[in-house]
Image: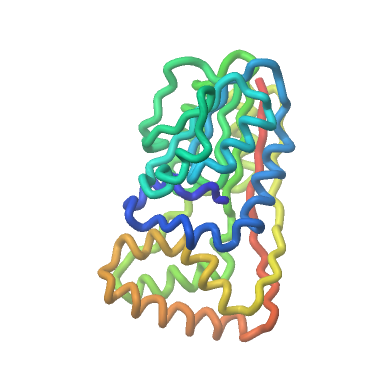
Amino acid sequence: MGHGSHLMPHACAGDTMWNPDQYERFRGERQQPFDDLLALVERRDRMHVVDLGCGTGELTRKLHEHLHAEETVGIDNSETMLLKSSAFGGEMMRFERGDIEAFIADRPFDLVFSNAALQWVGDHENLFRRLASFLAPHGQLAVQMPANDDHPSHAVAAEVAASFGVSPRPTNVLAVERYATLLHHLGFQRQHVTLRVYAHTLHSSRDVVEWVKGTLLTDYERRMSAADYERFLEQYESALLAAIGEEHPYFYTFKRTLMWGSF
């Protein structure tokens, strides 16, 4: 899940655009990157954890329980997402509304975790410096972000949006080798940085539209009138199908950056 998503500044997009039901249409497909990221984290005793861009909180609870954490805090700026988080909270796990860019740690964390959220935030050089500053002496950083801007699903959206006078969403995600260098300079003694292709077999090419409506297109929707967005969707679907063809099923490749570091 991009359980992410969510904190669009899970640069924050307007809260009203996040539709948890649309986002969760591909829940199983979105959970695999989370599971892969979680597998990189080393479980330690009495961990204090923050999950930046926690979305509905369901995966935050999985994170909390897997680590047997002492305390987990989920941060998201989407009120509609956080409304669902009340079902997952507890005495040692809580959720707060806030922007990633404005987040300030009141105590060191043993793990700063973010799944499919930091792609919405700019200036990753400074962002990761801040995230590293939140960590305890032997703390860990674990981040997963989509890196699929060159796929037609994303590139066509930017082209069609431009025809409506809406600028493309900034590409904030850096090359994987840049993150490896960045983690090194920030003092992480150990690291794992990888670019992975996730393969999703969708019912048809048209399902790609439904996929991106839950994430990528929320930013364009935020910046258009309702009428323009409806026209945008029609033109986007037409242009996308022209680019990728009408296939049943459709093999959708989706690149993601996963990284982990420990001091």
Q: How many numbered dots are placed on residues in this image?
A: 0
- Camera-nearest residue between 212 and 160: 212
- Camera-nearest residue between 199 and 210: 210
Position of 262 with respect to 215 (left or right) is: right
- The residue positioned 29% from the left and 67% from the top of the image is 224
Coordinates of residue 220 in the picture (x, y in percent): 37, 64
Determine whether 217 is above or below 170 in the image.
below
Position of 89 with respect to 28 (left or right) is: left
- Camera-nearest residue between 2 and 124: 2
Determine whether 188 is above or below 149 in the image.
above
Picture quadrant where residue 163 is located:
bottom left
For the C terminus, give its image quadrant: top right
The color scheme shown is: rainbow
- The residue positioned 48% from the left and 84% from the top of the image is 238
- The residue positioned 55% from the left and 83% from the top of the image is 241
Coordinates of residue 185 in the picture (x, y in percent): 60, 26
Coordinates of residue 51 in the picture (x, y in percent): 53, 34
Picture quadrant where residue 143 is located:
top right
Position of 135 with respect to 121 (left or right) is: right
Coordinates of residue 28 in the picture (x, y in percent): 65, 57
Picture quadrant where residue 208 is located:
bottom right
